[in-house]
Image: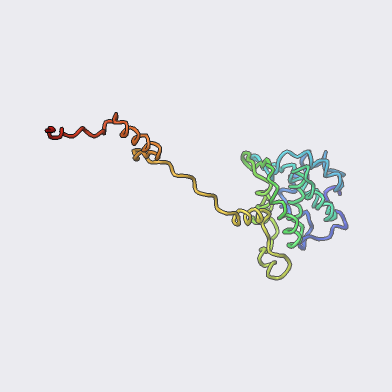
Amino acid sequence: MANTTVLDAGTIHGTNPQFLVEKITRTKIYGSLYWKEKCFGRTADGIIDLAVELKYVSGSYGGNLKPSKFLQLTLKLLQLAPEIDIILEYIRNEDYKYLRALGAFYLRLVGQHKQIYQELEPLYTDRRKLNYREAQGWSQIYMDEFIDKLLREDMVCDIALPRLAPRHHLEEAGFLKPRKSPILHLLEAAAAAPPAPPAPAEPAKGAAVTFDDDDDDDDDDDDDDGGGKGAAAPGPPGPPED
């Protein structure tokens, strides 16, 4: 049948991959026009053409909780269960941000704990904006925010995410190395730089005005000429001569 999972898909987390999407949501997707016209007969490679046309990330929206195109493409990938290398090409593609977001979301649903951290954490440096359509209204988030949701939250795009082991547990078990921030070298360089010299202080209002030594010399010249205000007065006349 058109809506069944491919025979060689196997199980994901012990269940049919499509069952990661709730039944009521799956039923709505199977009945949608987009699914019937665009998703029918598509392969994993053919999904790329639809993913690059996406304009927003979303789960279900509107009063009747209509499943978004993003969510329908996610279900199609779960139905096809493509090789993980194909999904990694989605994620590593830097030209189409919604293709990357779709690949990251799918990997979070089906990937192993170690692989999820290794492939999604580098996307923290992606600062492109994504349109995010919620049940009621729109918002904008950055790609790194979306990745953080996938790694930290239990539900994204109205899908309950499989449990993800905390990162520090994988570090203690030796599966992951401690994560280093991509801007760590900038912080270390700023800490090692010598402090900037303090700015010269401005004189306070009403402060006494000082003069240079040249001004004092000018005053001395005035005294020598006798024309200054501070010239000495002549003394009394001496006794008359005999």
The residue drawn where x is 70% and y is 70% is 173
Q: In the figure, 232 relative to 16: above or below?
A: above
Query: Image point 62% across, 39% down: which residue?
Result: 137
174 and 195: which one is in front?
195
Residue 208 image point, x, y percent? 34, 40
Q: Which colour scheme is used?
A: rainbow
- Of residue 81 and residue 229, the one placed in the foreground of this image is 229
- Identify the residue at the far front of this view: 242
Q: Nearer the viewer, residue 108 or 7?
A: 108
Count numbered badges in the picture: 0
Outermost residue on the bottom side: it is 173
User: Which quadrant would residue 38 be assigned to in this image?
Assistant: top right
Residue 169 position within the rendered picture, expressed as x and y whole percent measured from the top left: 67, 67
User: Is the residue 138 above or below the residue 20 in the image?
Assistant: above
Image coords of residue 13 (percent x, y): 76, 62
Where on the picture, by quarter, is residue 115? bottom right
In this rendering, position of residue 4 left or right of residue 157: right
- Give how far across and how far down residue 20 sits, in percent: 74, 55
Q: Quadrant of the C terminus?
A: top left
Q: Camera-side residue: 53 or 4?
A: 53
Residue at the farthest top position: 227
Q: Residue at x 72, y 51 (%)?
A: 123
